[in-house]
Image: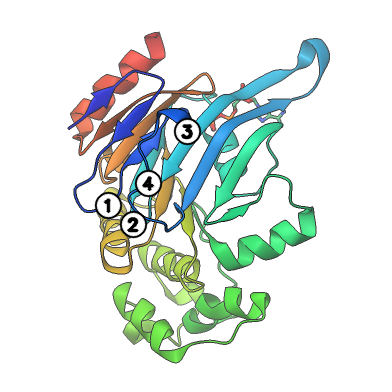
């Protein structure tokens, strides 16, 4: 387990190039020429103006390599949702840049950004947001149809098998359990081979046993498909399934833990509240 409170954090990983949090100048030279899955440089997000202005993100630097599973944790109001919206291209930063793969999305116009998101970003939310009239298979392939891409049969079959839905392809959401519906949502997030999947409290609506299975599935997707996943949560149990946990307090990253247990994460959270 590694821990740091420094503003610049470098986390070495034996199988992947280093993951860095901090100013780009402080980062080591990249180990490969493949662009990181996600890179934020000096991202600031403010809401409102004048005396009522709130700065929700205060200069976030983050580089995530492909195949990493990262949890972003912080107390209520620390900026988790704002981070997720800025990093996923759902909102535009006030300043700084966000790169997904080798594309800078921070100054993209709304319609181009929406198109980019459909192709390059996957989302898994607490609410599954499945279309009730469509079958499991149709829900999963919907992002491809919306993006105007054809369905690759082999890839679809692999994804459906990976999430354990092979026998349920023709069912409709109402005929599935909560855990099964979230598996459909995960498969739907993966089908476009996105650079990053963003998960926002993905187990919030599930009982703890089913939630555990969903978290294990997300971890498995990072290993089997080299999928990059960023998960926002306030729950140390949930965060403990990620490879590393980055702590957000008052709009800034204040440290990280690697391979940490629930107890270690909970202890660190208590510390970040008082710092
Ligand atoms: N649209 C908005 N207008 C003004 N202030 C906002 C807006 N959205 C968020 N904020 C403020 O920005 C800060 C960060 O909010 P954010 O929702 O990102 O935190 P969070 O960590 O996701 O909180 P929670 O865990 O409670 O959902 C808070 O002070 C919040 O009040």
**Earlier residue among tags 4 and 2:** 4
Q: In the rendered image of this protein, does residue 254 appear above or below residue 239?
A: above
**Earlier residue among tags 3 and 1:** 1
Q: How is the image coloured?
A: rainbow
The residue wearing badge 3 is 24
**Front disc: 1 or 4:** 4
Measure the alpha-carbon separation of dots 2 and 1. 8 Å
**Earlier residue among tags 3 and 4:** 3
Q: Nearer the viewer, residue 127 or 37?
A: 37
Q: In the rendered image of this protein, does residue 151 appear above or below residue 250?
A: below
**Front disc: 2 or 1:** 1
The residue wearing badge 4 is 30
Kindly indicate whether the residue at mark 4 contacts the one at mark 3 (C-beta within 8 angstroms): no
Q: In the rendered image of this protein, does residue 33 appear above or below residue 159?
A: above
Kindly indicate whether the residue at mark 4 contacts the one at mark 1 (C-beta within 8 angstroms): no
Q: Residue furthest bottom?
A: 153
Query: Callout 4: few (<14), some (14-19), or many (20+) C-alpha neighbours within 10 Å?
Result: few
Look at 48% across and 74% down and name the residue there. Answer: 191
Q: Nearer the viewer, residue 28 or 193?
A: 28
Q: Quadrant of the N terminus?
A: top left
**Front disc: 3 or 2:** 3
**Front disc: 4 or 2:** 4
Where residue 225 sits: x, y (%)?
Answer: 33, 68
Query: Callout 1: few (<14), some (14-19), or many (20+) C-alpha neighbours within 10 Å?
Result: few
Measure the alpha-carbon separation of dots 3 and 4. 11 Å
Query: Callout 3: few (<14), some (14-19), or many (20+) C-alpha neighbours within 10 Å?
Result: some
Label disc, if present, on residue 67 of the rendered structure: 2
């Amino acid at each position: 387990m590694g821990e740091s409170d420094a503003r610049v954090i470098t986390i070495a990983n034996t199988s992947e190039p280093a993951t860095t949090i901090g100013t780009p100048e402080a980062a080591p030279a990249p180990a490969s020429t493949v662009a990181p899955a996600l890179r934020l440089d000096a991202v600031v997000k403010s809401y409102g103006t004048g005396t009522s202005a709130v700065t929700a993100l205060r200069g976030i630097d983050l580089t995530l390599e492909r195949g990493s599973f990262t949890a972003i944790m912080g107390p209520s109001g620390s900026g988790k949702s704002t981070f997720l919206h800025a990093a996923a291209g759902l909102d535009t930063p006030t300043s700084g840049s966000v790169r997904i793969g080798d594309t800078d999305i921070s100054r993209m116009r709304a319609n181009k950004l929406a198109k980019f998101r459909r192709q390059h970003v996957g989302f898994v939310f607490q609410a599954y947001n499945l279309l009730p009239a469509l079958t499991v298979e149709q829900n999963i392939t919907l992002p491809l149809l919306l993006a105007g891409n054809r369905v690759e049969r082999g890839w679809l079959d692999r994804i459906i098998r990976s999430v354990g839905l092979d026998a349920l392809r023709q069912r409709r959401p109402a005929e599935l359990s909560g855990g099964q519906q979230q598996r459909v949502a995960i498969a739907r997030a993966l089908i476009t081979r996105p650079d990053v999947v963003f998960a926002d409290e993905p187990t919030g609506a599930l009982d703890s046993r089913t939630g555990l299975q969903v978290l294990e599935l997300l971890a498995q997707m990072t290993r089997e498909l080299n999928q990059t996943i960023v998960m926002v949560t306030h729950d140390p149990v949930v965060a403990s399934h990620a490879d590393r946990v980055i702590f957000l307090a008052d709009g800034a990253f204040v440290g990280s833990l690697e391979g940490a247990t629930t107890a270690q994460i909970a202890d660190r959270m208590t510390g970040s509240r008082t710092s």
